[in-house]
Image: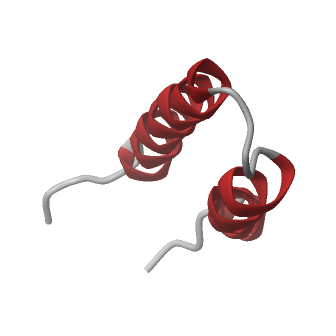
Amino acid sequence: MAKRGGFGLWLGALALLVLAGVAVPYGVLAGGQGWAVAGFWGAFGLAVIVLIALGIRGWRDA
C-alpha cells in the first residue's frame, strides 16, 4: 500500500475547522448579528465541502 503525503496537513485542517465550528459561533459571534452567524455557517459549510473533496480526490477503487 503506497503512503499518500499530505494526510497530516489535511487532518490538521480538519481539526482547525472543527475548533472553529465551536469557538466562532459560540464565542466570537455570540450575541452578534444574525447575518454574521449565517455568513459564518455558510462559509463553514463551504469549507467542509472543500475539505471533503480534497480528502477523497485520490481515492481509487481496488
Is residue 8 left or right of 40 when viewed as pictured? right
Residue drawn at point x = 66 percent, y = 66 percent: 22
The single residue placed furthest to the front in the displayed view is: 31
The single residue placed furthest to the left in the displayed view is: 61
Residue drawn at point x = 74 percent, y = 52 percent: 30
Is residue 40 shown above or below 57? above
Counting from the top left corner in percent of width and height, residue 49 is at 41, 37
- Choose between 29 and 21: the one closer to the eye: 29
Is residue 55 left or right of 24 when viewed as pictured? left
Is residue 13 left or right of 45 when viewed as pictured? right
Q: Quadrant of the N terminus?
A: bottom left
Counting every numbered tag in the picture gives 0
> Which color scheme did the rendering employ for the protein?
secondary structure
Residue drawn at point x = 67 percent, y = 52 percent: 25
Counting from the top left corner in percent of width and height, residue 12 is at 77, 67
Is residue 50 left or right of 59 when viewed as pictured? right
The single residue placed furthest to the right in the displayed view is: 28
Residue drawn at point x = 67 percent, y = 25 percent: 36
Is residue 51 shown above or below 34? below
Is residue 8 shown above or below 10? below
Q: Quadrant of the C terminus?
A: bottom left
- Choose between 1 and 5: the one closer to the eye: 5
- Choose between 58 and 17: the one closer to the eye: 17
- In the rendered image, which quarter is residue 18 located in? bottom right
Is residue 57 shown above or below 13? above
- In the rendered image, which quarter is residue 45 located in? top left
- Choose between 37 and 53: the one closer to the eye: 37
